[in-house]
Image (cartoon, helix red, strand yellow):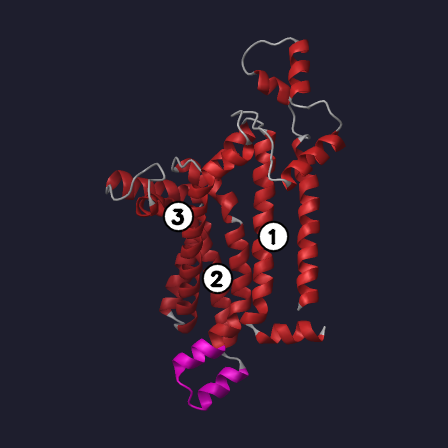
Amino acid sequence: MLAFLGRRLGSLVLTLFVSSVLIFGSMYLVPGDPATFLAGSTKTTPAQLDVLRAEYHLDDPLLQRYTEWLGGVLHGDFGLSLQYKESVQDLIASRLPTTLTLVVYAGLLILVGGFVLGLVAALNRGLVDKIILLAISAAVATPVFVVGVLLLAVFSVGLGWFPATGAGDGFADRLWHLTLPAIALALSLIGAVARISRSSFVENLHRDHVMVARGRGVPENQVVRRHIVRNSLGPIATIAGLVVAGLIVATTIVETAFGLNGVGSLLQASVAKRDFPVVQAISLLVVGAFLVCNTIVDMLYPIIDPRVASWRKAS
């Protein structure tokens, strides 16, 4: 187990390092001169642009800029935003509570909704299964921004049950404000998790050990809990880890549609304004969150399915 943890942590660090090289390098492949953006709408001479490049170290060799940037990142310093003239870490920290609350809220809806729908569909083959499959297909096929507009039109403008914009103050008010954005963010992903869950449950429904348990008169609820659900959790945990890790990127559309001042809307604005330090920092944090989520899922496998622990020990 320790060897496995060592390999996973080593792989995580190596992947983060490679990602940091790609993220930093790709920013400089984007057309356009950051110095021109820094100058804004005012007319500037070539000499003034040279001064701006020197002030922000834009003329330094690429390797030097990367090592200085990476050194700062390792000390929690992501540099200065070109657009806001503030430290990037302070800028992200001020937006993070809204995005984290939205991600956790949507993540819970996705995991609980997808799991329950998949289980109900697998255990009720026939009309119920077909209705759920149809609803799942519709949810997966509907773009997030369409769901957001529909929710706003019906529940904010039409019925007035939820606010149309803003993140709210305090825990309860924030949950109320983020309910529609969380549903918009979660709906299509609930369908994806429900599909995987249903397939995994159906696959285990007719396994030999399940038939033997039923033949021995084990109550159906125990058969479902001990033999079907437990053996189906591996694929569900994998898709759940991928989905939750990708939610931060998906918040870009939802935060913009609902006027939320979060990390997703900050990323969108920073890409449009070529604010390289902010885009680099958020991209690296997203990759880090994705890798950490997948590492946690890998570590949970032996707990979910003891056969995985035996296999890893044997290998």
Amino acid type at mark 3 = Ala
In the image, farthest residue toward the bottom = 216
Amino acid type at mark 1 = Leu
Above or below: residue 163 compared with residue 131: above
Q: Which residue is mark 2?
A: 195
80 lies left or right of 150: right
Give the mark nearest the N terminus, 1 or 3: 3
Work out whether residue 192 or residue 313 is closer to the camera in this orientation and state it: 313
CA separation, marks 2 and 1? 24 Å
Which of the 4 quarters of the picture holds residue 283? top right
187 lies left or right of 154: right
The residue located at (47%, 35%) in the rendering is 265
Which of the 4 quarters of the picture holds residue 78? top right
Q: Which residues are magenta?
A: 208-227
Q: Magenta segment: does it hold 147?
A: no
The residue located at (60%, 46%) in the rendering is 287
Work out whether residue 123 or residue 33 is closer to the camera in this orientation and state it: 33
Secondary element at tag 1: helix
Q: Which residue is mark 3?
A: 182
Above or below: residue 113 compared with residue 44: below
Q: Decide: few, some or many residues near mark 2? Use Cα within 10 Å; few <14, some 14-19, many ≥20.
A: many
Amino acid type at mark 2 = Arg
State yes or no: discs 1 and 3 in contact (Cβ < 8 Å). Answer: no
CA separation, marks 1 and 3? 23 Å
Point out which mark residue 291 bears: 1
Give the mark nearest the N terminus, 2 or 1: 2
Q: Decide: few, some or many residues near mark 3? Use Cα within 10 Å; few <14, some 14-19, many ≥20.
A: many
